Image (cartoon, rainbow, N blue to C red):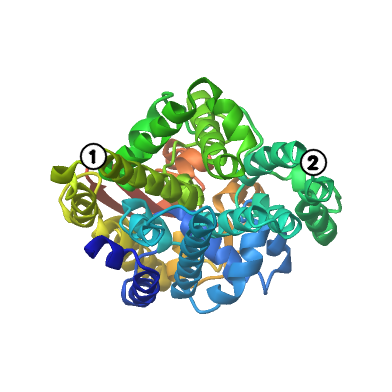
Amino acid sequence: MFQKALFSVKSFYFLFAVLVAVFISTCFVFDGIGNGGDSVLHYLIAKYAPTHPHLYFFHWGKPFFTLLASAFAQFGFQGIKLFNTICTFSAIYFSYKLAQHYSIKNAALLLLLVVLWPLTISVNFTGLTEPLFACILIASIYLIAIKKEIQGSFLISFLPFVRSEGLIILLVLTIYFIINRNKIALALLAAGHLLMSLAGVWVYKDILWVFTKIPYAYLNPIYGKGTWDHFFIQLNFMIGPIQYALLIIAVLSLCYQYKLSVVKQVFLNPKLFLIYLVFVAFFLAHTLFWTLGIFGSMGLTRVFYGIMPLMALIVLEGYNVVNLYIENHHKQGLKFIPIAIVAAMFVFPFLNNPASYNLKRDLLLSQEEQLLKDSVCSYLKTNQSTPLLVASDYRIPYFLEKDPFDSACYQSGRCFTKLKAQKVPFNYVWDNWFSEVEDQIGLERLQVDSGFVCQQTYTIKQGNSENTFKIFKTITQ
């Protein structure tokens, strides 16, 4: 009785409304910015795109994300967090509708499954692109599932302009539409590339810019590479061990049900294809990328938030497998297990372990960011000796409230060599990650250069890592 009440339609919509209110409040109460440079840079691109229209077609920033997020970004970082919250809950809603369409029991549980993931808290309250990716992916799959293939194909054709992994999804759906002999939907998978090519040709003077400007089209491992089991291990910390176990149960149950014909069934059954095969393709692709160190892979776990709806649906199927086993075998003494699983999922994220929430890290400025704001940027506000600031870390112009795309007041570290050759006076903020790794500007190079003098040094230790910022100025000749 309790289980039926918990998973009823009314309970779903009531809890949905409550959690939306909680998440929106969180966007405005806490000052976190995503604990990383990518989060801030996506926000800055969206914020300043109306001032610099070419940013709407900046491939790294992801044009479709920038187009949709730009209006929200005008209200500050809280606006971009609000945008991602809308995307997250829209993705949950379409997951719920898809579960209902396929008659997957206990569909209301999807809401709790996603909200109780550590991954959700760490990605939702950022400027990252994964929530929009998840939203468009599941909305498109839902449209395809309910026989609105043309609308679904058109919508999902823009997915590569939210995240580059959208190309993986388009490849999988190409196979789907070929199998189902849907020529119109198959052709429409190219709509996003065609429309974006035409819309952005004025920026690049190249009709093929959607391919030639892809930022990750290289095979050298600039961020290193890892082991094949990396994401298999990390999935435990993304969604928690209980849900990970349910996901494994769902996959094993599928293999047991169809045995040697499982691959055939996955390709012939729309539900299995659109949920399981898309998930597996995405997972194996990222495993391959990180193992080989290709396409700019850094082994980041946040990318899996993009397939959050599919993972949640598979976890739900695992939960239902456990339920069904107990019902079919009349295990009266085990009837408490489904409720115990839900209760454990509630409790576990709040325990002090590597697979639980880290609210301080995910909702507040990190110690490094606090140092940047209170020390580095405070110093620059009163001691910047030239109008031009050069830095590799985009959190610096964010805290300084500078337009990072106005070349008169700010330029990225990649312009360092050119500016130096032109003898342009500037202040430069060196750091031991973005400057050293991203822009290949070593500290030794600055220390031996007589054209620079170090004005200030800030260092902070966080766990086993140390972050250093050094402020240099050019010496007037």
Q: Are marks 1 and 2 in contact (CB under 8 Å)?
A: no
Position of the C terminus, as image quadrant, is bottom right
Three-letter amino acid code of the residue under disc 1? Asn
Q: Secondary structure at mark 2?
A: loop
Q: Which residue is mark 1?
A: 464
Check disc 2: other Cα within 10 Å, few if <14, some if 14-19, many if 20+.
Answer: few
At 73% from the left and 40% from the top, the residue drawn is 174
Q: Is residue 427 visible?
A: no
259 in relation to 346, above or below:
above
Task: Give the x, y percent position of residue 397.
Answer: 49, 65
Q: Nearer the viewer, residue 400 or 363?
A: 363
| Left/right of residue 376 with respect to residue 168 in the rendered view | left
Residue lying furthest top in this view? 260
Task: Give the x, y percent position of residue 170.
Answer: 68, 43
Q: Secondary structure at mark 1?
A: loop
Q: Which residue is mark 2?
A: 181
Task: Give the x, y percent position of residue 294.
Answer: 57, 29
Task: Give the x, y percent position of residue 48.
Answer: 61, 70
